[in-house]
Amino acid sequence: MKSGIGKFPRLAVVLVGDRRDSHTFIQVKLKACDQVGIETVVVQLPKKCTESELLDVVSSYNDKTDVHGIILQLPLPQHLDEEKIINVVSPEKDVDGFHPSNIGNLVIRGRKPFFVPCAPKGCIELLLKHGVEIKGKRAVIIGRSKIAGLPTSFLLQRHHATVSMLHAYTKNPEQITCEADIVVADVGIPNIVRGNWLKKGVVVIDMGANQVKVMTSFFSILGDVCFEEAVKVASAITPVPGGMGPVTISMLLSNTLDSAKRAFGMIRNFE
Amino acid sequence: MKSGIGKFPRLAVVLVGDRRDSHTFIQVKLKACDQVGIETVVVQLPKKCTESELLDVVSSYNDKTDVHGIILQLPLPQHLDEEKIINVVSPEKDVDGFHPSNIGNLVIRGRKPFFVPCAPKGCIELLLKHGVEIKGKRAVIIGRSKIAGLPTSFLLQRHHATVSMLHAYTKNPEQITCEADIVVADVGIPNIVRGNWLKKGVVVIDMGANQVKVMTSFFSILGDVCFEEAVKVASAITPVPGGMGPVTISMLLSNTLDSAKRAFGMIRNFE
């Protein structure tokens, strides 16, 4: 895009504090942006910054016409009101898709949000690219985080799946999961979904990424689904790592690119 | 409130065109407001009014500090973009709860919308008032209209039910419905939910209100659930008419009162 039309997408990354995992995630995102020609600008605020300092930073990027996307790396330190700050990100630059008006427009059929959250968007892309029929299928989402499980349920419903949403209060989750043609796991507990939870031929999307200590100083990343068992039953399954993680990152790039295209007048609205 | 503090809630009702059913609904709402001391102001625009005329009316009520709620009677004539006009209603006066930011805040746990849509709010009120346990129960919603079924699913989920959402593309809806402890019907087809769809002891909320011709010039209102069959199986069931209809109207009054209280500084935010 840069060499073609002399313009390029720019993503602002706002990070508060020094969480190691947040730094790792940011690094992965920055590297991916760099590889595809999305310029990034990173603002790092100290852990003890005030709410108004953070709000000022976000607002300043809302106003900058040469910034097309803003991501606020979550979680924020506890003294900051996460929801309040997400509210301030302009919905038109909210490439994470977490702003309530974007979520509201995702939920209501016939409406179009500026952005769809990255992991759910990636989930649907994967299913569609692999020719998995969604319409009329039974889908079970296990876990209802606002960044993954919950918006995935909205998207699957948009594609006319019959969606059941399972969570910590669900009794006998394995019984309901057994009926599903598509299972999406977003639990945060390694290997909780076992092979005997699954119907033969099911399609499994594992959104888990659980860091598990394997030796004194080594960590391994495990999914929410016991891969070794599930792979024997499923017709398709995403591995962890190397499954939904990279797909999610690529959706962030896609959202940022769409936003830049809109700003450059290259598309009227999101596709 | 008027005699106590010399102030009172005021609701603006915007009606476009001359649909008979819309007029009937409005009359019911106006009467209910009158009975509880909510002042109403009705604006009726001709069927052929332009979008900008309608937007001007809505905006003018957004600006009036002595108007606490605005309802836009739906459906609008086809040449008007319903979603665009709903977007313009101030979320703080959107007593129908249809604005995307209110829907978004309803969906995301931990957030609070200014208003919850009336029929879904009434559904939860009914369940709670009658001591029906929601947490951990299987709930099936049949139908996903944005005014009833869809937001009801969000509310039931907020109360930690395990929710399945059924719709026109669902195969064997009776099979899934049979597993439910709570069934909410929002289909728009008279008597579609039969007794043999239901588990013994189920709680049934019927949101249907289908006008059916019984004689040449007489109409009867039927629900989506075959009451005669369902009542033999259910532990509790709402009748049609006289069930969810009046409850929904009372929630509109409640939302308008809450909005006025907020404007008068009597409550900080919604309860």
Image (tube, coloured by chain):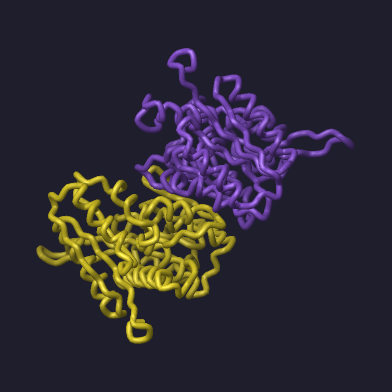
Chain colours: A yellow, B purple
Residue farthest to the right, as pictured: B216
Any part of residue A127 in sight: yes
Residue farthest to the left, as pictured: A216
**Is residue A190 shown above or below B21?**
below
**Is residue B73 shown above or below A268?**
above
Question: Camera-side residue: A230 or A23?
Answer: A23
Identify which residue is drawn at 56% across, 48% down: B55
Location of the C terminus of chain B (image quadrant):
top left
Q: How many marks?
A: 0
Res B245 → quadrant: top right
Residue farthest to the bottom, as pictured: A3
Residue farthest to the top, as pictured: B3
Rendering coords of residue B84 (x, y %): 54, 53
Rendering coords of residue B143 (x, y %): 61, 48
Identify which residue is drawn at 75% across, 38% down: B20
Any part of residue B235 in sight: no
Question: Camera-side residue: B167 or B172?
Answer: B167
**Is residue B12 shown above or below A212?**
above
Identify which residue is drawn at 51% across, 44% down: B59
Question: Camera-side residue: B197 or B94?
Answer: B94
**Is residue B99 shown above or below A217?**
above
Task: Left or right? Give the position of B235 relative to B64.
Answer: right
Question: Camera-side residue: B86 or B244?
Answer: B86
Identify which residue is drawn at 84% across, 33% down: B218
Rendering coords of residue B256 (x, y %): 50, 30
Rendering coords of residue B134 (x, y %): 46, 35
